[in-house]
Amino acid sequence: MSDFNEKDHPRDKDGKFVDKNGDVKVKAQKVADNIQFKRLDHFGNPIKDKSKDNSNSGQDAIDYLRQKHPSDFKPKVVKIDMTTEIQKAITDAKTPNEQRDIIFDYIMNEMRGVYKTGDGVEVTISYRTAKEYTHNAIEVKLRIAPQLAEILKHSEFIGIVDAEHKRYKKFMYYKTNFDINGKIHSAKINIGITLGNKAVLYEINQFRE
């Protein structure tokens, strides 16, 4: 893309680019947007030029997308289907450890892959997800596991922070709401960002009814 010369593109009182008749120039506005958010990160979100802004651009990108596409960020209550075979297996398990083993195997055999959050971040569910997710897991956490893809899809972004972790350089947090047998619950989703910029589902906790 060629360099953008500000003086060649007059603006109106609101700062939008206009032609000689005062009409908004959509193409010029897109050029300006591409300069401010001139590349996409591995999540598909626009980020600022790091040479001009060394601040954390993750939140900036999310805020930008929220303004452009507010309807994409409306949270939804996910209804957990308690009639499936996997839910019956959890109910029939004799101990909490047996329940955890059932969900560990389910995640490993049925759920490993890449899924999107409510704002389009691609998140991997992996062996490490299965291991961390089921470690000392309470029953409500196990009950939502078969619908993790839907949980992620309808999650709501909370924030992103630097992490002191041997595998993850940052953690992204999302809120989820779900319905189990008519009772509405909420929880916090923790997604780890690896040194290679891969997003991995790390944990779901802070369950509240």
Image (spheres, rainbow, N blue to C red):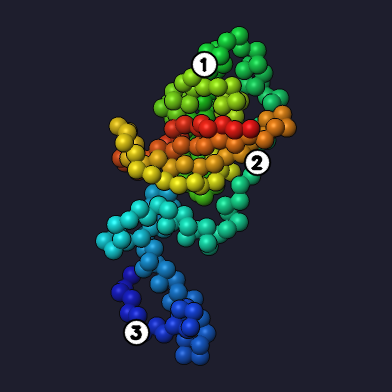
Q: Secondary structure at mark 2?
A: strand
Q: Is residue 111 visible?
A: yes
Between the residue at mark 2 and the residue at mark 1, the CA separation in whole angstroms equals: 27 Å
Find disc 3 in the rendering and name its residue: 7
Please tell me whether residue 79 is drawn above or below residue 117 in the rendered image: above
Q: Secondary structure at mark 1?
A: helix
Please tell me whether residue 99 is drawn above or below residue 60 in the rendered image: above
Q: Give the position of the N terminus as an image quadrant.
A: bottom left
Please tell me whether residue 140 is drawn above or below residue 66 in the rendered image: above
Between the residue at mark 3 and the residue at mark 1, the CA separation in whole angstroms equals: 65 Å
Q: Residue 128: percent from the left, percent from the top? A: 41, 27
Residue 207 circle label: none
The residue drawn where x is 52% and y is 22% is: 137
Q: Residue furthest top?
A: 94
Between discs 2 and 3, the one toward the N terminus: 3
The residue drawn where x is 56% and y is 35% is: 187
Q: What amino acid does circle 3 point to?
A: Lys
**Tag 3 near tag 1, CB within 8 Å:** no
Left or right: 28 in relation to 100 = left
Find disc 2 in the rendering and name its residue: 77
Q: Give the position of the C terminus as an image quadrant.
A: top right
Q: What amino acid does circle 1 point to?
A: Asp
The residue drawn where x is 67% and y is 35% is: 184
The residue drawn where x is 56% and y is 26% is: 141
Left or right: 141 in relation to 132 = right
- Which corner quadrant of the image does residue 57 belong to? bottom left
Q: Residue 123: percent from the left, percent from the top? A: 46, 40
Circle 1 crowding by C-alpha within 10 Å: few under 14, some 14–19, many from 20: some
Circle 2 crowding by C-alpha within 10 Å: few under 14, some 14–19, many from 20: some
Between discs 3 and 1, the one toward the N terminus: 3
Find disc 1 in the rendering and name its residue: 101
